């Protein structure tokens, strides 16, 4: 039993140290030639005109969040749909409950006007 946890520990150490080593290697190998032009703000390769800090409407973020929510829903429902013919009653009820919860969230967002574009 302890041998199996040893493999998990080794995997955890590798999972921690590989990204850290990659980040450190990139930090040491990067070109270090700072000059004022590198620190200027630009957008799409052109110099900005006016204030560069623009606040976006919160509705953009809410719309994107709802999209991500239903995108993740599709990812979770795909295996359920593939194994639909082998599901027990418990699996069927759990999948339907999951869809009902997400449908409730959609109805809530719709009633609150989150999907209305103004």
Image (cartoon, helix red, strand yellow):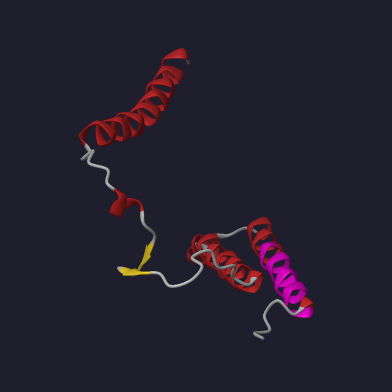
Q: Is residue 39 above or below residue 48?
A: above
Q: Quadrant of residue 33?
A: top left
Q: Nearer the viewer, residue 8 or 94?
A: 8
Q: Left of 36 or right of it: where is 111?
A: right
Query: Percent from the top left, x then y, of residue 98?
Result: 67, 62
Q: Nearer the viewer, residue 48 or 68?
A: 48
Q: Left of 30 or right of it: where is 78?
A: right
Q: Quadrant of residue 16?
A: top left
Dominant secondary structure (helix, strand or loop) of the stretch shown in magenta: helix
Query: Percent from the top left, x then y, of residue 46?
Result: 32, 70
Query: Percent from the top left, x then y, of residue 49?
Result: 43, 73
Residue drawn at 42 percent across, 26 percent down = 12
Image quadrant where one finds the C terminus:
bottom right
Residue drawn at 36 percent across, 56 percent down = 40
Q: Nearer the viewer, residue 60 or 74?
A: 60
**Residue that lies at the very extreme toward the top in this rendered image:** 2
Q: Which residues are magenta?
A: 98-111
Query: Percent from the top left, x then y, of residue 115?
Result: 67, 80
Residue drawn at 49 percent across, 60 percent down = 79
């Amino acid at each position: 039993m302890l041998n199996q946890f040893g493999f998990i520990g080794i995997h955890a150490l590798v999972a921690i140290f590989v990204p850290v080593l990659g980040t450190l290697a990139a930090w040491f190998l990067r070109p270090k030639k700072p000059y004022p032009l590198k620190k200027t703000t630009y957008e799409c390769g052109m110099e900005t005109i006016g204030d560069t800090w623009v606040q976006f409407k919160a509705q953009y973020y809410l719309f994107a969040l709802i999209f991500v929510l239903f995108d993740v829903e599709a990812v979770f429902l795909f295996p359920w749909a593939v194994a639909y013919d082998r599901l027990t009653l418990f699996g069927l009820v759990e999948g339907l409950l999951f869809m009902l919860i997400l449908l409730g969230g959609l109805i809530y967002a719709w009633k609150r006007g989150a999907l209305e574009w103004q």
